[in-house]
Amino acid sequence: MKLFVRILFATIVTIFWSDRLYADDIIAVETENTGLYLINDNGILKQLYYGDKVQDKNEFSLMKNMSLEVYPFYGTGNFNENAAQIIHSDGNITSSVKYVSHYVESFGDYDKTSILLKDQYYSLEVGITFTAYKSSDVITMSVTVVNNESGPVQLGRLMSGSLNLRGDRFYLCRLYGTQGYEANFIEEEILQGTKVIESNRGVRNTHFDNPSFMISMDNKATENSGRVYGGLLCWTGNFRMSYQKDCLGNCFVASGSSDFAGNYIVAQGMSYTTPLFAMTYSGQGKGPASRNIHEWARTCVIREPDRVRPIVLNSWEGVGMNFTERQIEQMIKKSADLGVEVFVLDDGWFGNEYPRNDESQGLGDWQCNKKKLPGGLSNLISVAKENGIGFGIWVEPEMVNVNSMLAQEHPSWIVSTDKRDPLLCLSRMKSQQLLDLTNNEVKDFVFSVVDSILTLNPGISYVKWDANRYAPDHGISSGDTRSQNNFWVDYVNGLYDVLDRLQNKYPSVFFQACASGGGRMDYGLLKYCHEAWISDNTDALSRVYMQWGLSHFFPAYVMAAHVSATPNHTTNREIPLKMRLDVAMSARFGIELDPLHLSESEDDCIKKGISEYKKIREVVQFGDLYRLASPYDGCSQIMYVDKAKERAVVFAYVTEPLPYEKYNVVRFEGLDPESKYSLVEINKDIFCSREISASLGKVYSGDFLMKNGIRLNLNRQYQSAVIELKKIN
Ligand code: GLA
C-alpha cells in the first residue's frame, strides 16, 4: 500500500511539473511583429506556434502536448515526413536526437538562436540556427551536422527548414513553368497526402519550379487579408519542398536541398551545414509577406543592394553570334545616343580554332575571336568609354563544348559518368558539357577565365554569367563513392566559391545570373549577382505574368526586363512599343534588339522611355511594391512607393480584351492619407492622343486615392499606362 501511495505521489508530481512550463523552457524567436515559439519537451524540440507575436509567451504553458516536433528525424516513430534521416557510421539508419541546450546572441537588427541537439547514442551533434531579422519580419533557419562518430555518416535527408502549420485548409502559391515560359503563378489547395515540389536538374533550378512558396491558411489570401506564410530556399541546386497534410488539421512543410540520387557523406570529424531557408508571416495577406521578403533580401542577401541598377543594351536578340567589329562599334554608339548606360556583348565573341559562330563549338576557349573582333575587347571598351557608357561581356565559364581546345586538353575536367555515354540531349546540351566544379583545379580554371578577362580588360563593368546545361550525367567518373554522392551539393558550393572569389576581387563589377533565361532565379546566386535574367522570352505580355509571379518573392531591381523587337522572337506576337517600354520600366529596365534597325519614331520613343525611367527608377528599384490588380483578371496594376511616401509610380497593363466601356479603377495603396499627391501620366503614348483618365494633372489626398481611387480609360488588350504620384508640400 505504502509503495502504491509513493508511486501515485511520484506520478502526480511528474505530471504536475512536466505540464508546468516556464518562460525559460520556451525558445522565443521573435521579430518586430512575428514570433516562432519552440519548446524543449523532455528532449523533443517542438514548435508551439508561428505567427503574429504574442504578448505573453508564458500562456503557451499548457500547450506542449498539443504541439509537434519541429524537426523530426527518422527513427523516432514518426511515420510522417521527416526533416532528416541519418545513416550512422555503423549502418544504423535511425536517430534519436534530443535537445541539449540553446543560446541567443543579439546583433543590432537581428538575433541568432543556436540550438544544440545530440544523438543519444552516437557522437553526432546537430545545430539548428534561427536568425530573426527584426525589421523585415523574416526568420531564417539552417541545420548543421557535426560528425564525431568513428567513421563517415550519410545524410539520407537533411532539410534546411521545417514548419508545423495548423488549420482547416491550406492554399499553396508557387511558381512553375519551363524555359521561355517561366514563373507562372499558381494557387492550389493542399489536400490530404504529401505534395512534393522539387528540382533534380543539378546546377540550375528555376525554369520549372522555384524554391519558394506562400501558404494561406483556411481561405485563399488576398493582397491585404488572410494569414500567409512565405518561405524560400537560398539554393541553386537540387531542392525538395514537401507539404504534408493530415486529417487532423496539420500541415508539415519541409524545404531543403534534395536527397535525390545520392546521400551526402560527411567524413569523420567533419561537419555539413544546409543552405538557408527563409520564412515570413503576415496576418494581412500576401502583399506584406512579399514586402517582408523584399526588405530582407535587400538588406541581407542581394549583392550591393543599394546600388542603382544601370540601363543595359544586350546584343543577343539583336545580332546573336553573327556580327562584325564595325557593327558592334556602331551599336555601342547608338546605345549611348539612346541613353543606355552599359552595352553588353553577348555570346559569339570568342574561340579561334573553334570559332563561336554557332552553339556547337567554342565554349571553353575564352580568347577573343580575332577574325570577328580584330581590335579585341579593348577596342570595344574604348569605343564604349569614348561614348560615355560602360561595357559588359557574356560568359559561360562552367561549360565546355565537345568541339573546343579545352575539351581536348582536359577531358578529365568534364562531368561524366563512368561506363556511360555522355548524355548529349536536348538542344544546346547536344554539344555542350559541364565542367566539374567539385574539382579544385577546375574551380581555379573557371575563376581564371573571368579573372583574366577582367584583368586584361579593366574597362569591363558588367558580366552576364550564363549556364545552358543541366546535369543529367550523374557524378564524376574519376571520383570515389563520397565524391559521387556529394557531387550535387559540392558542385553548387564550388560555384559559390568561385563567385565569391570574383566578388572579392572585383567588388564593383556588376554580375547578372542567367541560365537559358530564368534557370537561376534564386537567392543562392543573388548573394553573388546583382540581378537575374528572367527568361529568353522577352514578349511584353508574357513578361507581365512572369514579373507578377516573381514579385511575390523578388524585388523589381533583380529582374532584368528588356524591350525587344516586334514580332517577338519567341512568341511571334506583336505588341506596341509603348507597352513593351512600360513593362520593362517596372523592373530593371534594358533593351535587347539591334538599335541600328530602329525607325525614327521608335528611336524617339525609346529615348523618351529611357529618360523617363531614369527619373523614376529609384522608386521602382528601391520602393515598396503593392500589387493592385492581377494580370490574370484582365488588367494588371502594380505600384511602387518610396520609403518616405513622397513619390510613387503605378504601372497598368491590359492583358486581355475587356468590355469596351469598362473603366479600370486604380485604388492606390501605401500612400500617406494626410498628404496631397499630384498625378501625372508619364511615358505617354506618342501615337495616341486619348486621355487615359480625367484625374490626371490633378491633386488628391492620399486618403481619397486609397479609398476611392481613380478611373483609367484602358480596356483594349496591350494598352498600358504609367502614372507618377508626387507629394505636394
Ligand atoms: C542563353 C541566354 C540568352 C543568351 C544565349 C547566348 O540562352 O539565356 O540570353 O545569352 O544563351 O547563347
Image (cartoon, rainbow, N blue to C red):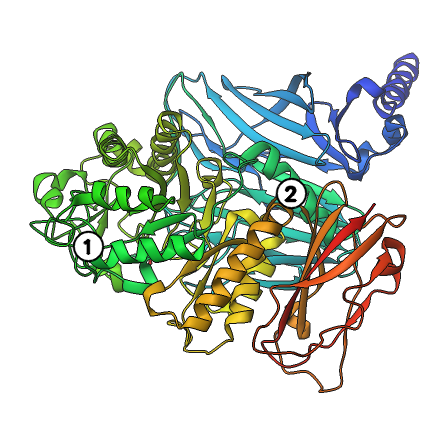
Q: Amino acid at mark 1?
A: Glu
Closer to the camera, 200 or 414? Answer: 414
Q: Earlier in the sequence, mark 2 or mark 1?
A: 2
Q: Which residue is found at the position 86% from the left and 24% from the top?
A: 15
Residue 682 in the image: state x and y as whole percent: 64, 62
Residue 129 in the image: state x and y as whole percent: 61, 26
Residue 579 in the image: state x and y as whole percent: 55, 70
Q: Amino acid at mark 2?
A: Ile
Number of callouts in the render? 2
Residue 278 in the image: state x and y as whole percent: 61, 38
Mark 2 touching mark 1, by CB under 8 A? no
8 sits to left or right of 245: right
Q: Which residue is found at the position 90% from the left and 28% from the top?
A: 56
550 sits to left or right of 252: left
Asked if one can make out residue 541 in the rendered structure from this viewpoint, the answer is no
Q: Which residue is found at the position 60% from the left and 38% from the top?
A: 298
Within 10 angstroms of label 1, few (less than 14), some, or many (20 or more) residues? some
Question: Of the numbered discs in the image, which one, if any, rests on residue 325?
Answer: 1
- Where 559 falls versus 145 (above or below)? below
Name the front one of labels 2 and 1.
Answer: 1
Say which element carries label 2. Answer: helix
Question: Of the numbered discs in the image, which one, if any, rests on residue 293?
Answer: 2
For the residues labelled 2 and 1, the Cα–Cα distance comes to 44 Å
Q: Where, quadrant-wise, is the N terminus in this rendering?
A: top right
Say which element carries label 1. Answer: helix
